[in-house]
Every structure is written in C-alpha cells, then in structure tokens.
Image (spheres, rainbow, N blue to C red):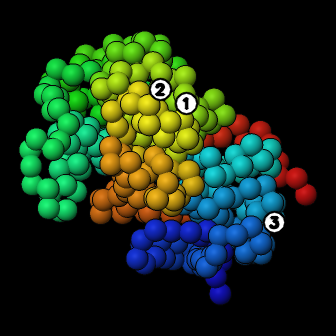
Amino acid sequence: MSTFKVLLTDYAWPDLSLEKEVLGKIGAELLVAEKTDLATLTTLAVNADAIMTTWAQVPQQVIAAAANCRIVSRLGIGLDNIDVQYCTRSGIPVTNVPDYCVVEVAEHALAFILALGRKIGFYHHAAKQGRYKLQAGPVLRRIEGQTLGIVGLGHIGRCLAKKAAGLGMRVIAFSRSRREPVENVVFLDLPDLLTQSDYVSLHVPLTPQTQHLLGAEQFQLMKPTAYLVNTARGGVVDHAALAAALDKNQIAGAALDVQTPEPPDLNAPPYNDERVIVTPHAAFVSQESLANLRRRTAEQVVAQLTGNLPENIVNPEYRHNQRPE
C-alpha cells in the first residue's frame, strides 16, 4: 500500500518513468490528472499529500481540497499558476526549479534574434512557395554591432547577455533589482532601453507589475527597424497592441514563443503576420533540461514528505504558519 499520494496535474513529455522512479523510493503513488479543469483537480486533490504542476492552474480551491498537502512543486520557473499566497497562509511550502532551462531559453532567444535579423523565416516561406529571390526580402543588416535590450536580468537574461556579447552585440538592460553588475552590460530605465534597442528580449516573470509591460505606449518608443523577442510569458505583451504596432510599421517584427492564450488563434494578428515568428512554447525544451527538471521536482517532493528540507522554497515564510484545520 502506498505511503503517500502525489497529484500530478499535467505534463508535457511522453512518459512518467523518471517521476515514478524517484517517488517510488518512498513508496509514493502518482495520481495523474487526465483533465486540468477545476472540478477534476479538486476531486483528485482530496487524497493528495503533495501536488506537482506544470501549466495547470492550482488555485486555492484545489489546494484547500488537499487537507494533507505538504508541498506544491512547480515543474518550471514561473509561479503564476499557483496560489502561493494561500499556500503561505496555510503553512505549505512552494518550490520551483529556477535554473533548469537557463541555457535553453537563452539559446532560443538568441536563435530568434538571428532568425529575425537574417530574415530566415521570411526567406524560408518565400522559397517554399516558389519565390527563390534575394531581392524579395527586406533590407539585411549586420547583427554584430547592433544593440540588444534585455528586459529582466535574472539567470536567463544574464546568460543571453553573455552569448550576445560573444556575437559582438552591444547589450543594455532594464532590471528593477540591479542586484549585481554584469560585465559589458549597461543598465537603463525601460523607456531609454526601448528607444535605443535594435532587439528587445523579454525575460521577466508574469506579475501584476509586468502584465502588458509592453503595450501601445512602449511600442511607440521603439525604432521602426527594431524587433521584439518574447520567451518569458505571453501576458507580458499586449498582443493587440503588438498587432497594431506592426500594422502601423512602428516595429519591424517579432518572435514569440509564449502566447495568451496557448495555443492562440494563428489565423489572427499578430500571429498571421509574415514578420512574426511563432514557436509553441518550446524554448525551455531539451532532453537535458527536461530530465533535470523532472528529477529535481520529484526530489523536492520526496524531501518534504520525508521530513527534509527541499531546495528552492520560494515562500520560506511559510514556516511561521500552521495549516488551518
């Protein structure tokens, strides 16, 4: 008989062998949700000692239903799908894996920059449609020497800054914290960054403060030759404002890995614009990153359920609270 039951709300990989291997060491049973609607998750949570979640919403109602829940672990970095405040009030630690896909997302953002700058997407689609003509494309500029503006200089932003500097780009950044200086990176406020950048790459979490951080007002500040890159969260960009900015030629194009909602209507702007590159929330993926993510998240659950301290507790103040009866 299983000692513990762990609810997995959703996942994006072919099998759960790695999770079962780690959890099996303490005899924990994995409860896998077939649907992510509120009713399904609430029902399954009743028997859960722990919750692991990827993208599914885990609001107060789900957590409250899990009377024995001792940890909520995010298979990822951002925490906007978990009611962290309720967990804190209820004496439940919340964990994530903040550094698991740093290299992958930085590489994806850099690939976007290169694809936009060299018009890879445009030429690819034109060639596939029978237009094999150099002159059909927009004007090309050398990427070396251009300015990359990074919004959010956490782990991923810093990794991208290093890679972009290696290409000979000038790197500027906007960061509210400015915790540590970064070699060859100049800090600016957001309006100045938008005004100076040839490429703007977003690397901030989705919070009430960053919701639609880039909207109509911000697009008006950007160069008409500049590009937007978003591998952070879809909600950081006002997509209606982006579509309008493209329609007015206020910016030259965009590359979007994250959307609101997901999947978006690909027949609607800005997604149907030939100047926009779209990938299906793929920036975080590699064999290496997923294995690292899955194992470490399961190990966090095992640690908490066996009386040990898991890594990456995002709400350490939970220890001062007791779960209400």
Disc 1: which residue: 215
Q: Amino acid at mark 2?
A: Phe
From this view, report whether residue 111 is shown above or below residue 198.
Answer: below
Secondary structure of the residue carrying tag 3 is helix
In terms of depth relative to the viewer, which is nearer, 300 or 235? Answer: 235
In terms of depth relative to the viewer, which is nearer, 48 or 120? Answer: 120
Determine the residue positioned at 30% across, 34% down: 160
Q: Nearer the viewer, mark 3 or mark 1?
A: 1
Distance between the alpha carbons at the discs numbered 3 and 1: 38 Å
From this view, report whether residue 161 is shown above or below residue 307.
Answer: above
Upstream in the sequence, badge 2 or badge 3?
3
Determine the residue positioned at 91% across, 57% down: 325
Determine the residue positioned at 17% across, 42% down: 137
- Are circles 1 and 2 on residues that touch, CB within 8 Å? yes
With 173 as the anchor, is 128 left or right in this view?
A: left
Secondary structure of the residue carrying tag 1 is loop
Distance between the alpha carbons at the discs numbered 1 and 2: 6 Å
Q: Position of residue 38 (x, y in %)?
A: 74, 67
Disc 2: which residue: 219
Alpha-carbon neighbours of circle 1 within 10 Å: few (<14), some, or many (≥20)? some
Q: Position of residue 136 (x, y in %)?
A: 15, 44
Secondary structure of the residue carrying tag 2 is helix
Distance between the alpha carbons at the discs numbered 2 and 3: 44 Å
Q: Position of residue 4 (x, y in %)?
A: 65, 74
Q: Amino acid at mark 3?
A: Ala
Quarter of the figure with residue 85: top right
